[in-house]
Image: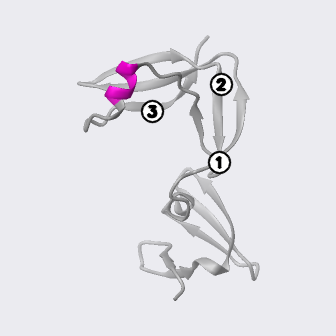
Amino acid sequence: MKQFLTINDNGDMLNIDMIAAITPTRNGCTILTKDGREFHSVFNLAKELEDDAEIRAVVPCHGVAALYYLGDNQTEIRPCPLVYLLSDGSLEPVEFASAYDIEECASANRVGFVGLVSAL
């Protein structure tokens, strides 16, 4: 049995075996099929196809910091000398975790990495 993904709000579906490439965009993604058709989706289907994005490269950074949400409307900016380039095209900071950091990550609160910011 083939897997189908819903690609828009209208409920249109696409067989995943027909997908040649997915390019994430600001408002979802662009899907290129093996027969050359192109679809625009409001969903980021790259994340749905990959349960765990794989690390493709570790990239050294200069002048970049990672923005973290700590809960209770508090944020923190931490230096970010290295980032992971993931298979879905996203960037995440390389984290050197302490025991406290690991415990925080295990909490049920919505805290953690938010995005990259200028460190200048």
Residue highlighted by disc 3:
114
Distance of mark 2 from mark 3, alpha carbons? 16 Å
What colour scheme governs how the chains and residues are painted in the rendered image of this protein? one colour
Which mark is in front, 2 or 1? 2
Which callout, 2 or 1, points at the residue further toward the start of the chain?
A: 2
Write the residue at 62% across / 49% down.
54
Is residue 101 on the magenta stretch?
yes
Q: Name the amino acid type tagged 3.
A: Val
**Left or right placement of residue 110 versus residue 92 in this view:** left
Q: Secondary structure at mark 2?
A: strand
Question: Which residue occupies the foreground of this view, 108 or 21?
Answer: 108
Q: Position of residue 77 (x, y in %)?
A: 47, 17
In the rendered image, which quarter contains the C terminus? top right
Residue 14 versus residue 58 in the image, above or below: below
Tag 2 and tag 3, C-beta contact below 8 Å: no
**Left or right placement of residue 41 versus residue 107 in this view:** right
Residue 82, labelled with which disc? 2
Q: Name the amino acid type tagged 1.
A: Gly
Please provide the residue range marked out in magenta.
99-104
Q: Position of residue 59 (x, y in %)?
A: 72, 30
Which callout, 1 or 3, points at the residue further toward the start of the chain?
A: 1
